[in-house]
Image (spheres, rainbow, N blue to C red):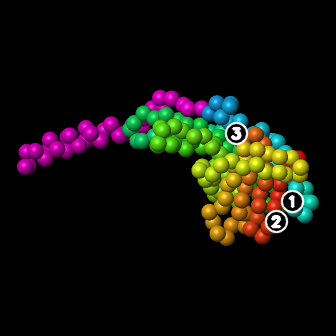
Amino acid sequence: MKRNYPLLVLILLLVQSCCFTNGEEIGRIYFTPEEKAIIPYADNQTIQFITDEDFEFQLNTTVSSTFYSDQDFCEDYTSYENYQVYLNSELPTLDVQLSLQNRYNGEDDDDTLYVAITINNAWFDYDFSEPLETVEINGTTYTDVYHYYSGVLDNPISVVFYSYTFGILKINYLNGDYAQINS
């Protein structure tokens, strides 16, 4: 056994030596302009909103596009774009993050692009099995509206209505208050 020990140590060192270097980026995956368009906001845009008590306010936007890598140590990797839009207002206090996401559907090996929504650090879920809704706001009818809901019981915001064409249309609060696009 003592004779095999140096050989075992040498083999172990050779196997681990590949991990002393990082892998290389072999590609980058970008979202197309058409894909980014499902978050219909531009950088430094102002969106007019109004509450149920006729208080008007603005949501201001900031667009962020960065890359992250799906890297395992020692292996080559591909970087994927991380596209996010931030909307915020001081009164009412709203910090909204919209993120472009891919949802892998294992049934038909297809990716579904969707928008993930976080408001004031609370995640909102969309039930992909629900049909799209039609919503009327200030006399304007919006079709193909996604209904996001909060999974947190004590979150003051309960529902968000979102359109790939217009963005956030309405935010409902648990107490019955709401804020909606001022179209």
Q: Which mark is residue 38?
A: 3
Locate residue 182, reporting x and y percent: 88, 50
Q: Which amino acid, mark 3?
A: Ile
Residue 91: % across, % down: 84, 60
Q: Dividing the picture into quarters, in which one does residue 65 lie? A: top right
Q: Which residue is mark 2?
A: 177
Residue 28 among those drawn in magenta: yes
**Residue receiving disc 1:** 51
Q: Distance between the Cα atoms at labels 3 and 2?
A: 27 Å
Compute the Cα span from label 1 to label 2: 7 Å
Quadrant of residue 151 within the rendered picture = bottom right
75 relative position to 127: left or right: left
**Which tag, 1 or 2, sits closer to the chain's start?**
1
Of marks 1 and 3, which one's residue comes earlier in the chain?
A: 3
Dot 1: what SS? strand
User: In this rendering, is residue 110 above or below 97?
Assistant: above
Which span is picked out in magenta?
1-30
The three-letter code of the residue at mark 2 reads Asp
Q: Residue at x 85, y 52 (%)?
A: 137
User: In terms of depth relative to the viewer, which is nearer, 95 or 123?
Assistant: 123
What residue appears at the point 27 percent right and 39 percent down from the top-left corner?
A: 15
